[in-house]
Image (cartoon, rainbow, N blue to C red):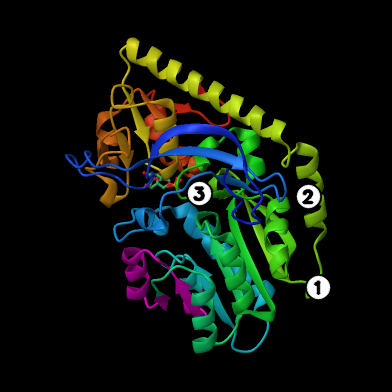
């Protein structure tokens, strides 16, 4: 029995996604021999309701010096981060000479807006290659993991923070209690901690199990965030749904009793309780929905192969690693995955070893079908790929259900 990373209660396991590799470790051809795998099981805490991986690889395996995820590769996300930065600035930075800290600041996609506004800032980003990219753009960044020691060092050197924020990062940090202690150490008495991550409610509603992979140790809900941070004197004061990553939630926390609590918190918690986000049966039903989704996707791809159609993947996302390995889909069913990120091109997808090729190949090859792995960027992609669709190219979707369009 594994102990809940937030409260120590034994976690109840409800399913396994089988043997999974590191989702963002794209391999050099010929470098597949020593690939690392782990059994990806998930469970929930019966006490604080936190949804979590049972086992997670060492963070050093995931966020290394060749980490393949650069935030600035998607236009939609750039606009989103600008909006997030504006929200923090306009809502919470009212005092003189504010200081903000971002946990997991990646290539500086959000902090550059604070730099441009002349606001004192610090990025905490353990992957040195993306942190270097941020520093080159003039964004103050340190390459360490965030925890109570880092928080204390920052507080001593630069003072307490008016706002600490993170986007798609807190769900990556197994020591959630350490994050909470760090935030409690670094925040001003009236400061806020704002973070957003894929939302458990959306994952359950859409069977978007591809949000679960090695890096995503947690899928949060308002209930679990409230429960995980309360013992550290941090109160959930707002939760605002976001369209990113196929459905995310922005959580705002402050020190207990320092801020009014939005009605959105009690409304969201009531919805989650009614939807069964804390109940074992809900997760058993989710496990069955994942199995149905897997079987439907594999049957569809096999049928297309038998009828001689060409099928490729569109975008070698981290999420696609879970789908491909859980479903056992390899190069026999998807000949390659097109991706716009230069460092992924020419490599093989983790675990199933499907070649990743430049986007130019997708445009030149005109495949019959493309599996939409970046379904969360659907609008952006549909607008860009009118030509593909006009000449009869079709999409295979697997969220919220498996189908062709
Ligand atoms: P994203 O959904 O942000 O990834 P993740 O699941 O890793 O969080 O998608 C980013 C990846 O998708 C990145 O490798 C670039 C690729 N991509 C394309 O190749 N074409 C596109 O049009 C888009 C939007 C993304």
- Image coords of residue 386 (percent x, y): 42, 35
- CA distance for labels 3 and 1: 30 Å
Q: Which of the two discs, 3 and 1, labels the residue nearer the N terminus?
A: 3
- Residue 375 seen in render: no
Q: Quadrant of the N terminus?
A: top right
What is the magenta range? Answer: 114-141
On screen, residue 395 versus residue 229, left or right, reads left
Callout 2 crowding tier (Cα within 10 Å): few <14, some 14–19, many ≥20: some
- CA distance for labels 2 and 1: 19 Å
Q: Element under label 3?
A: loop
Q: Which residue is mark 2?
A: 269
Q: Is residue 70 positioned above or below 376 on the image?
A: below
Q: Which residue is mark 3?
A: 216
Callout 3 crowding tier (Cα within 10 Å): few <14, some 14–19, many ≥20: many
Q: Which of the two discs, 2 and 1, labels the residue nearer the N terminus?
A: 1
Q: Residue 29's quadrant in the figure?
A: top left
Q: Is residue 129 positioned above or below 198 on the image?
A: below
Q: Which residue is mark 1?
A: 257
Q: Which of the two discs, 3 and 2, labels the residue nearer the N terminus?
A: 3
């Amino acid at each position: 029995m594994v102990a809940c990373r937030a409260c120590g209660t034994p976690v109840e396991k409800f399913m396994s996604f089988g043997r999974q590799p590191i989702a963002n470790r794209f391999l050099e051809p010929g470098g597949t021999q020593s690939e690392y795998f782990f059994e990806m099981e998930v469970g929930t805490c019966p006490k604080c309701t936190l949804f979590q991986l049972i086992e997670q690889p060492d963070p050093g395996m995931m966020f290394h010096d060749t980490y393949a995820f650069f935030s600035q590769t998607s236009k939609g996300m750039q606009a989103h981060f600008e909006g997030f930065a504006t929200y923090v600035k306009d809502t919470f930075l009212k005092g003189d000479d504010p200081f903000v800290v971002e946990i997991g600041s990646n290539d500086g996609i959000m902090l550059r807006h604070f730099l441009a506004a002349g606001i004192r800032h610090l990025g905490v980003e353990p992957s040195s290659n993306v942190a270097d990219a941020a520093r080159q753009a003039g964004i103050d960044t340190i390459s360490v993991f965030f925890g109570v020691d880092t928080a204390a060092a920052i507080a001593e050197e630069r003072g307490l923070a008016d706002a600490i924020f993170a986007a798609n990062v807190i769900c990556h940090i197994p020591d959630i209690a350490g994050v909470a202690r760090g935030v409690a150490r670094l925040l001003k008495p009236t400061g806020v901690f704002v973070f957003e991550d894929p939302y458990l409610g959306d994952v359950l509603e859409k069977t978007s199990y591809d949000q679960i992979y090695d890096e995503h140790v947690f899928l949060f809900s308002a209930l679990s965030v409230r429960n995980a941070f309360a013992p550290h004197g941090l109160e959930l004061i707002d939760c605002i749904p976001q369209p990113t990553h196929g459905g995310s939630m922005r959580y705002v926390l402050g020190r207990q009793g320092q801020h009014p609590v939005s009605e959105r918190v009690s409304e969201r918690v009531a919805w989650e309780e009614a939807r069964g986000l804390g109940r074992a049966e809900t997760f058993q039903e989710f496990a069955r929905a994942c199995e149905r989704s897997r079987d439907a996707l594999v049957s569809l791809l096999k049928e297309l192969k038998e009828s001689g159609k060409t099928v490729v993947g569109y975008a070698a996302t981290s999420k696609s690693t879970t789908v491909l390995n859980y479903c056992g889909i390899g190069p026999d069913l998807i000949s390659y995955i097109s991706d716009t990120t230069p460092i992924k091109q020419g490599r093989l997808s983790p675990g199933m070893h499907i070649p990743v090729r430049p986007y130019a190949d997708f445009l030149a090859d005109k495949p019959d079908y493309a599996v939409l792995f970046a379904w969360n960027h659907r609008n952006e992609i549909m607008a860009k790929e009118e030509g593909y669709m006009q000449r009869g190219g079709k999409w295979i979707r697997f969220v919220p259900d498996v189908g062709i369009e």
